[in-house]
Amino acid sequence: MEEPNGRSARIVGLGTAVPSRVLTNADFERMVETTDEWILARTGIRERHVVGPDESVATIAVEAGKRAMEDAGVAPEEVELVILATATPEQPIPATATIIQPRLGVSKATCFDLSAACSGFLYALRVARQFIVTGDVSTAMVIGAETLSRYTDYTDRSTCILFGDGAGAAVLQAAPAGEGILRSAWHSDGTFADFIQMPGGGSRFPPNVKEHIDAKLPFIKMRGNETFKVAVRSLTEVCLEVLDGTPIEEVKLFVPHQANQRIVSAVGERLGLKDEQVYMNLERFGNTSSASIPLALREAIDRGRLQRGDLLLMAAFGGGLTWAASLVRW
Ligand code: UT7
């Protein structure tokens, strides 16, 4: 999708936060029947950060949001829109975005949550971009924040080793056409809704029923191997869609959702990406769902892997199923 009215939107500030508690593969060897070797070989993960008793999705989202505003040099009162992408909200009512509003000091912002699982950050980025491009909003903040550890079944070895907690925020403002977010694509397919799901905790299986807890319904469940195959295909297709014929060599950096090293390698191979074009930090954070792209992007910039003017490709895939990509002139 090209820019209407000769306007684009760009990320002018990025901030991230992870809780301090770390779970290593050795910790999981003590919890379930698994090994460091299996986890590393099948996923690429060594450790993940998880929230402690005094932390929650709001505490890390606030930390990331404050850092993003500081990085952008934007005062909280300038922010007109906050979209918080999360699958693990603070509570069902009200939206986590409104819960964090006073703590961020963004008193003039309209705040709401967006639910697109691991694709949430790119979905939210596209929504915010649209408001900026039309001139409705001058400064927006998009946050991806998750505490999947709260919904992880630590007796299920096929899922518990995967997830970590974290938050990443981006401040967006207008940019001339040809800069910032050049093209975005997003897709959903609910026929695969049961591939990644947390069946309980909502209105179908409310959390206040003992049988639902006993049946472990308010925990994340995944048909991992089937998800893996769809993820490789969908991520490749959505990247080609936003590249729209742009030669892959022109992409300076590919920052994918960090779900599994093998998924990213397979996508990279299909797209013809070289290793030095791909940024991964999955090894240290695990799958942080909607937080994974901003967590990786912030780190990539800090390590000098992306400069102003470089072409950045981001892509995500997750529950829904949902998938999305953005091509950005940084
Ligand atoms: O972020 C949203 C999108 N998420 C994804 O894209 C995740 C996609 N899926 C995956 O990353 C992978 O499917 C997993 C890492 C979850 C699993 O890897 P896999 O290669 O697909 O393994 P599998 O599910 O086919 O299981 C292979 C074997 C099974 O044993 P049997 O039936 O062959 O005897 C599992 O029971 O590996 C076993 N297994 C484990 N063994 C040791 C599953 N989990 C573990 C474990 N340790 N933690």
Image (cartoon, rainbow, N blue to C red):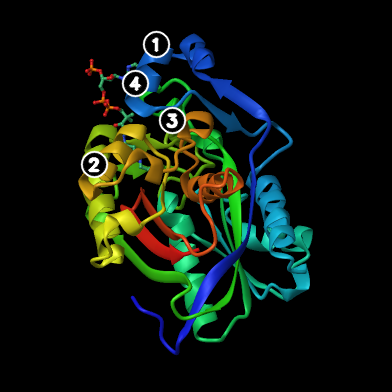
Image position of 170 (left or right of 203):
right
Q: Disc 1 or 2, which lies upstream in sequence?
A: 1
Q: Which residue is mark 4?
A: 41
Q: How many marks?
A: 4
Closer mark to the observer between disc 4 and disc 2: 2
Amino acid type indicated by mark 4: Ala
Q: Which residue is mark 1?
A: 33
Callout 1: CB less than 8 Å from ligand 1: yes
Q: Disc 2 or 3, which lies upstream in sequence?
A: 3
Q: In the rendered structure, find residue 162 and report the number of the disc placed on it.
A: 3
Amino acid type indicated by mark 3: Leu
Q: Disc 1 or 3, which lies upstream in sequence?
A: 1
Q: Residues within 10 Å of mark 1 (few under 14, many from 20)?
A: few
Give the SS element for disc 2.
helix
Closer mark to the observer between disc 1 and disc 3: 3
Image position of 302 (left or right of 287):
right
Closer mark to the observer between disc 4 and disc 1: 4
Q: Residues within 10 Å of mark 4 (few under 14, many from 20)?
A: few
How far apart marks 4 and 3 lie (CA) works out to 13 Å
Kindly indicate whether the residue at mark 1 contacts the one at mark 4 (C-beta within 8 angstroms).
no
Callout 3: CB less than 8 Å from ligand 1: yes
Amino acid type indicated by mark 1: Glu
Kindly indicate whether the residue at mark 3 contacts the one at mark 4 (C-beta within 8 angstroms).
no
Q: Residue at x 69, y 64 (%)?
A: 72
How far apart marks 4 and 1 lie (CA) works out to 15 Å
Amino acid type indicated by mark 2: Glu
* Above or below, 247 relative to 261: below
Q: Is residue 210 visible?
A: no
Q: Which residue is mark 2?
A: 269
Give the SS element for disc 3.
loop
Please identify the quarter of the rendering in which residue 212 is found.
top left
Q: Residue at x 74, y 36 (%)?
A: 54
